Image (tube, rainbow, N blue to C red):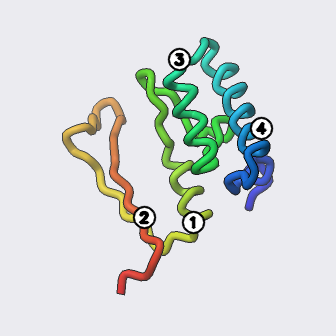
Amino acid sequence: MTKDQSQFPRKPPESSSLGTKFFNENLRAAKRIGGWPLAPRMISHLRSLSRDYAFSVEAGELQIIDGNWYVIHTGLLRLARRKRCRGIHVEAVDSLCDSAANDGVSVQRFWLRRLW
């Protein structure tokens, strides 16, 4: 684990007080980075993503795009590592990709067990 990864909590919090603290850190970071108040729906989703998957806004694992939370590829890789996934399959969604704008969407599938 690199130095910058070690400063962010990596395991989902066990108790509700730790879960609240982790969510509050993400909420502060989201408000600081976004610079605007979040809708109640966005706050609810952030609470769930913080508690259930331990994604971090500060680490860049979550971003707001068009009013929705998106898990960035880095967040998915860190989640796969925490869950000890056996493999990752990435496939581009051609209908949503724009190579001229260097923009793309992909589907990632993770395997927790051996495939054979």
Q: Are marks 4 and 3 in contact (CB under 8 Å)?
A: no
Residue 25 sits in quarter: top right
Q: Position of residue 9 (x, y in %)?
A: 74, 50
Residue 77 sits in quarter: bottom right
- Cα separation between marks 4 and 1: 22 Å
Q: Nearer the viewer, mark 3 or mark 2?
A: 3
Q: Are marks 3 and 2 in contact (CB under 8 Å)?
A: no
- Cα separation between marks 2 and 4: 29 Å
Label 2 is placed on what type of residue? Phe
Label 3 is placed on what type of residue? Ala
Which residue lies under the disc numbered 4?
Answer: 21
Which residue lies under the disc numbered 2?
Answer: 110
Query: Is tag 4's residue or tag 3's residue first in the polypeptide sequence?
Result: 4
Query: Is tag 1's residue or tag 2's residue first in the polypeptide sequence?
Result: 1
Tell me if mark 3 has few (under 14), some (14-19) or many (20+) residues whose alpha carbon lies within 10 angstroms of its own.
few
Q: Quadrant of the N terminus?
A: bottom right
Q: Residue at x 77, y 45 (%)?
A: 18
Q: Residue at x 50, y 27 (%)?
A: 64
Query: At numbered mark 1, what does the secondary structure look like: helix, strand or loop?
Result: loop
Which residue lies under the disc numbered 1?
Answer: 83
Query: At numbered mark 3, what does the secondary structure look like: helix, strand or loop?
Result: loop
- Cα separation between marks 3 and 1: 31 Å
Q: Are marks 1 and 2 in contact (CB under 8 Å)?
A: yes
* Horizontal relation, residue 1 to residue 82: left or right: right
Query: Is tag 2's residue or tag 4's residue first in the polypeptide sequence?
Result: 4
Q: Position of residue 62 (x, y in %)?
A: 56, 37
Q: Can you say whether 37 is above or below 97 in the image?
A: above
- Cα separation between marks 4 and 3: 20 Å
Q: Are marks 4 and 1 in contact (CB under 8 Å)?
A: no
Label 1 is placed on what type of residue? Lys
